[in-house]
Image (tube, grey):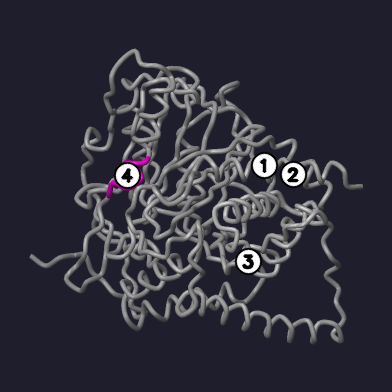
Amino acid sequence: MKSKLQIKTERGNLQENDGFEPVSPTGQYFNSKKLSVCILAVLESEVPVDDSCAIPQLRDVFLPINPRFSSIMVTDKNGVKQWKKLEVNLQDHLIIPSFPEDLSVESYDEYFDEYLTKTSSDLLPQNRPLWEVHIFKYPTSKAAGHIIFKLHHALGDGYSLMGALLSCVKRADNPSLPLTFPTTRSSLTNKSNSTRIIDWVPQTISAIFKGAYDFGWSFLKSTYNPDDKTPIRSGKSQGFQPTKISTIELSLDHIKLIKARVGTTINDILAGIAFHGIRVYMQEIDPESNISQSTALVLLNTRNITRYTSVKEMKTAHTKMWGNQFAFLHVAIPELIDDNSSNPLDFVYKTQQQIARLRNSPAVYLTAQCLEIARKCKGPEAAAELIYNTMNKSSMGMTNMIGPIEKVALVDHPVKGIYFMVCGTPKSLVITIMSYMQTVRIGVGVEKGLIDSQKLTSCIKNAFDLVYEAASKSQ
């Protein structure tokens, strides 16, 4: 019998048919021979976790969110990857580890850290849908229990997957009310749109040359010019190595005070603080590394949005919000000037200047086109290798997401904290940032055995204190 998998249009794209759906190019890159990238989302429960509600919640709420949660990735006779829908055995996806009873909170802290590290490196089986839910039922110093969602990046990017997870929770104070989120619009005054031709022409020419330079520099960083080996970059091929995860909690009100003083975005402030702390850590481990060539790959969401959309909106034909829609920006980590006159706010300013220029640079578009050319000429595995090399040759990765302003509950389990981590990348250091209620949570994922996680988190926290103090004194 002929397969109805079919189906190429004149442009060579596959169309959905008979339970099959084409895998996006980015989905193929992230689930390839070179890459298997996952997102860990950790929900900290205020009360002990009752796992009896897990299966009904997964069946009735989680699975209907998107067909990909009930699909596996298969390859057709033409070598094209497809999502194939099937019946899901939810017991295969729910994992509840068992540890000794009645231990101290400190002991369970260690068990949880070790379990999270192991979970970060375990590959998801390819013969079932690419997600798992882990329930850690033992009390730690952070929570009475933890719920860990492990979602493959091929299913969607952080925006898509976080939107899906937030569809599973309700406001703790009033479940009938919708969640609200901090605005992502800049409070800075927009410049006038009226620009004279005599000004527009040189600005356009300058943008073209800067874009060409940015693209050339980014291409060299991805291919021929790797970062220096430093205390945060081993230079080895890391793929699928265990990631030790720790977090830092910062006051959102304190960050807003810094924002009011320096006049930039919260994301740029946090990136500058992280860069400062990382440079201090590097210098303390190896004094010569303070002037090393080190860059961060910063993930930029390319959707033209200012809020999370609902899952229903994501799936409509006219929005197409679901999926992987982001770009990488190569951002040089500023050098650390070790003298009494150095101002920690300089890291914030330098970081903001770089990100603002690169965010609007044609290099973002050119880099995406370069990847598409590699895919069309040599196939998705070649494009995946290019992404792998881009990640491997930089020193660290950084990404961020916004969370709800109100406290949420997952099936009557109030959530006191949320954070996430990107795992499976060939990097020794990944920084993630997420806001929730009045707190910003910085996740620090490090290569186990290379980076002193406790020392690094302490350096980043100290950097925040220095920036906050400097901002408080500025007029």
Query: Residue under circle 3?
Result: 291
Q: Main secondary structure of the magenta part?
A: helix
* Front of the two marks 4 and 1: 1
Q: Which residues, given as a range, are shown in magenta?
A: 117-123
Give residue 200's position: percent from left, percent from top.
Answer: 81, 82
Query: Residue under circle 1?
Result: 462
Give residue 188's position: percent from left, percent from top.
Answer: 81, 55
Which sits earlier in the primary sequence, circle 4 or circle 3? 4
Say what secondary structure mark 2 lies in.
Answer: helix
Which quadrant would residue 357 be assigned to in this image?
bottom right
Residue at image location 60% in from the left, 34% down from the top: 179
Is 359 located above or below residue 208 in the figure? Answer: above
Question: Is 219 or 444 nearer to us in this picture?
Answer: 444
Hey, what amino acid is under mark 4? Trp
Which sits earlier in the primary sequence, circle 2 or circle 3? 3
- Asked if residue 196 lies in the magenta stretch, the reply is no
Q: Disc 3 and disc 1: Cα gap in Å? A: 20 Å
Query: Residue under circle 4?
Result: 131
Q: Disc 2 and disc 1: Cα gap in Å? A: 6 Å
Residue at image location 71% in from the left, 80% down from the top: 207
Q: Are marks 2 and 1 in contact (CB under 8 Å)?
A: yes
**The N terminus appears in which quarter of the rendering?**
bottom left
* Few, some or many residues within 10 Å of mark 3 (<14, 14–19, 20+): some
* Few, some or many residues within 10 Å of mark 4 (<14, 14–19, 20+): many
Q: Disc 2 and disc 4: Cα gap in Å? A: 40 Å
Say what secondary structure mark 4 lies in.
Answer: strand
Q: Which mark is residue 466?
A: 2
* Front of the two marks 3 and 1: 3
Hey, what amino acid is under mark 2? Leu
Residue that sits furthest to the top in the current view: 102
Residue that sits furthest to the right in the current view: 475
